[in-house]
Image: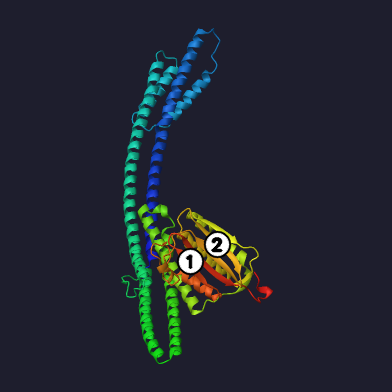
Amino acid sequence: MYDSIRVRLIATLAALVVALAGLGGWSALRLWDLGRVAERILADNYLSVEAAQTMRVSLERLDAGRRAQAAAPPGNSRPGQADDRQRFDAAFRAAAGNITEPGETEVIEAIRAGYARYAAGEAGALEPLREATDRLEALNADAMGHKSDAAGALARRDVVWTVALVALLTVVGGWLTRAVAKSVIGPIETLTRATTRIAAGDLEVAVPVERDDEIGQMARSFNEMAARLRQAKASDLDAIAQARQVAERVMLLEDVRHLHELNRLKSEFVAEASHELRTPITSLQLGINLALEHPEALPAREAEILGMCRDEAERLARLVRELLDLSRIESGTRTPRFVRCAAGPLVHDAVEPLRLAVAARGVSLGVDVAPDLPEVEVDRAQIERVVSNLVTNGARATRPGGRVTVTATATGDAVVVDVADTGVGIAAEHLARIFEPFAQVPGGSAGGAGLGLSISRRIIEAHGGRLTVQSMPGAGSTFTFTLPRAHGVPPGDRV
């Protein structure tokens, strides 16, 4: 079982998630402890402070009532004194049942004794009783202040620990993410450079296989593909030499058959190699997309690196798909599925999905379809692909503010479709090989592997038409393809 990139990415993300969950749990526990401290302050002291204040107010009201009763005629009594005594008794019971501080017992006893003397009518008993209630309030208020200071110190200490843990987790998480990303992006860049050299014709390139994961599988498959291409190239050179000898001996027909067989074998090899590369590339894309499911958990730099990995993997996957399509078209395994349809709606349906992508480049897209175009017999998906390739290439070659125009007219026995742009144009020396596989125009737009035009020409030729180009540097380009009119198609095949 090889060491999977997917497993490493999942393990790294799981470690980060577990660390964050641990930090969150620890912070919640500390907050709960602070809440308990606040609850203890309220339970231990606030009730006693409130009871002392209630007793003092009740004493004031009782004393005021006594003075008012003494000044009143005999037989008059002040209403509400019974309620004041009840409030005083209730507050005293609450304070006596909540003794939590040193010295509080003595104060409670002093209040009890003082109130007994006051209730018995002893002269001078009120002032000591007031002082006792004041001491009870001050004792608990001081205790609340000390406990509040202790809680503040505890909170500050927890803040310092939390900040330290967050900083530590950030450093460790960044290091882990960078290490995993570096182990992925480096080999992918190596594969991309090697693929570019292969596309440029350097078949001697080889990728070192230093690991046993998905990238290692891709490297092995790439090296096998390069080796087979070298063998195919050597076979082609041998075949060319043999063809010259056969031509000299008037055996040209046999040589042509041999070359056709070599081309068939080469197409089959490219198809097989492209198919084998799709599985490890798909696994690589899955792992990278999995790592980017929660970008907020990654440092910005590591998220940017993984994004670059995803773009390079998508570019490699697109190259493999185009190689596979080209080999299938060349080998004849992908033949058009002809149906009869109206040419006008066909062109419109192919252009409309491209408007947003073209507009995003600041380029306008126009369509001019002649009325009453004849019907054509085509594979709709393949013709829409040709139109998409030509419009996309035109938009890439056109600066913002320019225009791409698709025109469809009828002439003779064919429908003619022009895709014109106001872009940079193509020099005359490059027009001859513009439809060859992997052809790249110096100074042209980037983003493709140079297979789109080659595939498009083969599709049009399979439909019995032609794909040509006219261009001048600085004056834009016009790609033109023809589609024969439909003849003799049964009505059931109309779309």
Question: Observer-nearest residue: 362 or 297?
Answer: 362
SS class, disc 1: strand
Question: Observer-nearest residue: 319 or 451?
Answer: 451
The image shows residue 279 at horizontal and vertical percentages of: 44, 71
The image shows residue 485 at horizontal and vertical percentages of: 62, 72
Q: Which residue is mark 2?
A: 406
Q: Amino acid at mark 2?
A: Val
Mark 1 neighbour class, 10 Å CA radius: few under 14, some 14 to 19, many 20 or more = some
Using the image, determine if residue 261 lies above or below residue 436: below
Question: Observer-nearest residue: 412 or 277?
Answer: 412
- Looking at the rendered image, the quarter that the N terminus falls into is bottom left
Residue 78 vs residue 215: left or right? right
Using the image, determine if residue 114 lies above or below residue 75: below
User: Which residue shows up at 34% across the image and 34% down it?
Assistant: 149
First in sequence: mark 1 or mark 2?
Answer: 2
Question: Observer-nearest residue: 312 or 490?
Answer: 490
The image shows residue 358 at horizontal and vertical percentages of: 50, 57
Residue 81 vs residue 181: left or right? right
User: Which residue shows up at 43% across the image and 69% down it?
Assistant: 431
- Looking at the rendered image, the quarter that the C terminus falls into is bottom right
Residue 234, image quadrant: bottom left
Between disc 1 and disc 2, the foreground one is 1
Q: Amino acid at mark 1?
A: Gln
The residue most toward the right is 491
Q: Which residue is mark 1?
A: 470
Q: From this viewpoint, is residue 145 visible? A: yes
Q: From this viewpoint, is residue 321 visible? A: no
User: Which residue shows up at 34% across the image and 54% down it?
Assistant: 173
